[in-house]
Image: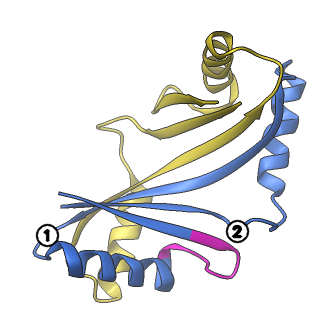
Chain colours: A yellow, B blue
Amino acid sequence: MKAIVHIALKPGVLDPQGQAITGALHSLGFDEVTGAQQGKVIELDLQGVDRASAEERVEAMCSKLLANTVIEQFSVEIID
Amino acid sequence: MKAIVHIALKPGVLDPQGQAITGALHSLGFDEVTGAQQGKVIELDLQGVDRASAEERVEAMCSKLLANTVIEQFSVEIID
């Protein structure tokens, strides 16, 4: 079983990384880019858990380690 | 128009970050995790380009700046 975790900044949180990407793309001539946001995807391989408890466990992993819930939001997707 | 870029390590490339995530999850008691891979997602806001040229331009952005194509692979998705 696999879990895909998407982590992104919460709306409204200052995003210097996105601004840096936008600025760098402009300096390379890609002026059509008006904004950029970078997020993380973490793919976890899971063994010995059923689907229901997997989702709960992965949410606990996000809250405890993978995401900084003060400034980041996450979503979990379980794939068989 | 939006472009979603997914960037991940190519298969076979050594992934110390994934190993660190796995180790940290084990130390927190999440022993069901047998492996982890972390990738990036970059969301770009685009203006003044049509769909066909957007895809081509975003692929150029990836090759020139966003991805390190020696060790990373990327995929581009255009959303209206």
Magenta segment, prevailing SS (helix, strand or loop): loop
Q: Nearer the viewer, residue B68 or B6?
A: B6
The disc, 2 or 1, on the residue closer to the chain's N-terminal end is: 2
Q: Residue furthest left?
A: B48
Q: Element type at marker 2?
A: loop
Q: Residue at x 30, y 75 (%)?
A: B55
Q: Residue at x 66, y 50 (%)?
A: B38
What is the x, y in percent for residue A69?
52, 26
* Quarter in which the N terminus of chain A is drawn: top right
The reply to whether the magenta stretch includes residue A79 is: no
What is the x, y in percent for residue A14?
36, 46
Which mark is drawn over residue A23? none
Side of A50 where B69 appears, left or right: left
Q: Residue at x 62, y 11 (%)?
A: A52
Q: Quadrant of residue A79?
A: top right
Is residue B62 positioned above or below A34 on the image? below
What is the x, y in percent for residue A61?
68, 23
Q: Element type at marker 1?
A: loop
Q: Nearer the viewer, residue B76 or B18?
A: B76
Q: Nearer the viewer, residue A12 or B44?
A: B44
Magenta stretch in the rendered image: B66-73
Q: Quadrant of residue B40?
A: bottom right
* Quarter in which the C terminus of chain A is drawn: top right
Side of B4 where B24 appears, left or right: right
Q: Residue at x 69, y 28 (%)?
A: A65
Which mark is drawn over residue B47? 1
| Residues at marks 2 and 1, CA–CA distance in whole angstroms | 31 Å
On the image, numbered disc 2 is attached to which residue? B10
| Amino acid marked by disc 2 | Lys
